Amino acid sequence: MRHSQILIALWDGEETKKIGETAQIVHFARKGIPEAYAIPRKHLDPVESRPVYHIITPRISNPAPKGEPFARIEYYPETLSHNDSFKVTFGNILKKIDSYNRDVIALVSHLTNEINNNKVYVIPAAKVDSLTPSCQSILHDYAVADTLALHFQKESKQALASILVLVVFAIFCFQLYLEFFKYPLMLLLYPLTLALLMYGIL
């Protein structure tokens, strides 16, 4: 639960006082994990809470729970439940996570050498094998994120350079028309270049 964005609770909705029951976990997700169960926090750290997707689930002990069986009810942290924009903001965060995951699937296989090089920048290759599996996983995730950041930074610079070249070319064509060549084709190059520029931006 500590590392999840959403808690999916298969729950009949019955509140109980039992330790470790679904009701308690849902309570933790909405109000924050009490200090007795949470990892140590600094005084300024925010309370750890997250949205809950409650799937109304019949149980042997409660075959007829309140509500339509298997319907989904969304709960958001109580401190934010009155903020209408939170649901939209949280949805945008999930979209960005999905976008990152798609980039990983599409590009990682083509950037293997760069990922391995970025690992070496952090820890020498000879010491990687001595790391625990969890540390190796963290190192790999860091190298992937860093490699993708550098990849898109390079693409952004190339796109910016292309835009500048097209802008200069468009102005150049327009000035040639005004000063030297009064041909419609020369003037037509100006809007065509701008159209190509807008297409590249979009």
Image: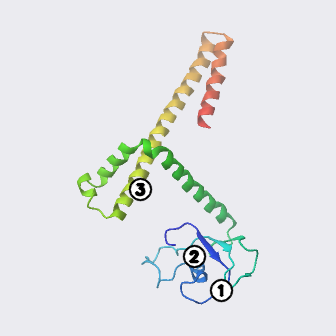
Q: Residue at x 62, y 19 (%)?
A: 174
Q: Is residue 77 at all visible to an observer of this figure? A: no
165 or 175: nearer the viewer: 165
Dot 2: element? helix
Indicate which disc residue 141 carries. Answer: 3
Q: Quadrant of residue 9?
A: bottom right
Instruction: Kindly report the distance in space between the C-alpha atoms of the residues bearing marks 1 and 3.
Output: 39 Å
User: Which one is in front, 179 or 160?
Assistant: 160
Residue situated furthest front in the rendering: 60
**In the image: residue 166, left or right of residue 131:** right
Question: Dot 1 surroundings within 10 Å: few (below 14), some, or many (20 or more)?
Answer: few
Give the x, y percent position of residue 74.
68, 70
The dot on residue 15 is 1
Q: Is residue 111 above or below residue 172?
A: below
The residue positioned farthest toward the left in the image shown: 126
Question: On residue 29, which mark appears?
Answer: 2
Q: Is residue 142 above or below residue 179?
A: below
